[in-house]
Image: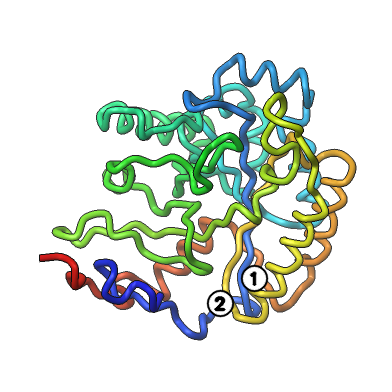
Amino acid sequence: MPWKLGYTLSDEISPARVAWPKGKAAVSIVVDYSVPAGVDGIDEAAIAYAQTVWGDTISGDWLIDYLDSYGVKATFAVPLVMANAFPDSIRRAQAHGHEIAAGSFAKEDVSRLAPEEEKRRIDQTFAGLEALTGTRPEGWFMLPRTGDDYPGGAISEATGKLLLESGCGYFGNSMADDIPHYWVTDYDTRRTLLMLPYYYAMDSQFFIFFPGIGKGNGLVQARTLGENWSAELEGVQLLGRQSTFVIQPYLMHFGVSRLQLDRLMQAIVGNRDLWITTSGECAAYWKATYPAEKTLHLEQAAWID
């Protein structure tokens, strides 16, 4: 990205013309497998309350069938607490060919935790999901909550290093780019973590019952969400970039939100200009085709003594 020059530790420049395995651009569907929660994250009470409002839709079983009907493979970003609450649904999603990624321990604000506790939760999440599915997740997501004051999810100063120590292959929701890029977690050791694009304007939770039940008027702005999705598809196709569309099972099952999801699916399925891929597939391709050792050059920025 040109704006990085003289500002960060990297002179990484986004490739002018990205070569994708198929089509001119890449798109991914990420299922934010969660329910509303506060800074302490999802607990049994939050799950029970969500069930009283949205019923069985929070389990995601309907969404698995829905994605199957379009032949689309998605990435399910699953907090460990949600996996423990709905283990059969998570196994079913995997059995149907969807990627199971780690969606944090409980979508808690890890900046409030000591590094030792954050590490324990990261390790527990990867191990727990592996025990449930038989496959260790490749990616880690820290998707935001609707009540957050920041759109990119909660991380701490230690998150990047801790994820690398855990063997994490990619971080799934990074702001400020429209293709994968590398996070330099430690300049001295040159360690990097692959980051995949995310932008909250493509995240359904900010348009459906935002800012959440009991927090404001809960206006549904599904038409705006649909316009965002449509414009994003047009843009990534034109420029050959990547976009991630984030949906929550409990929000997308009914009425106008389902209509916008239908329109999105109809727009991407069968479009030869698009490579419809999971986050894990995209990350693997990027690291093989645009590895950090060839595309990322580190040097101290001008403002560093």
Q: Are marks 2 and 1 in contact (CB under 8 Å)?
A: yes
Q: Position of residue 304 (x, y in %)?
A: 15, 65
Q: Which residue is mark 1?
A: 275
Q: Give the numbered dot on residue 27.
A: none
Numbered disc 1: secondary structure:
strand
Seen in the picture, residue 83 relative to 155 is either above or below; the reply is above
Q: Residue at x 48, y 27 (%)?
A: 39
* Residue 192, quarter of the rendered image: bottom left
Helix, strand or loop at label 2? It is loop
Amino acid found under the numbered disc labelled 2: Trp
Q: Earlier in the sequence, mark 2 or mark 1?
A: 2
Q: Is residue 169 left or right of residue 19?
A: left
| Residue at 64 percent of width and 70 percent of height | 275
Quarter occupied by residue 60: top right
> How packed is label 1: few (under 14 Cα within 10 Å), some, or many (20 or more)?
many
Q: Check disc 1 and give the amino acid type.
A: Trp
Residue sitting at the far bottom = 17
Quadrant where the C terminus is found in the figure: bottom left
Q: Which residue is drawn at the image coordinates 76% and 32% (left, top)? A: 217
User: How far from the left and from the top, in percent, is residue 92?
Assistant: 67, 36
Horizontal placement of 66 versus 50: left or right? right
Q: Which mark is residue 20?
A: 2
Position of residue 67 measured from the top left corner of the image (x, y, whole percent):
76, 50
The answer to whether 80 appears left or right of 303 in the picture is right
Of residues 92 and 189, the one nearer the viewer is 189
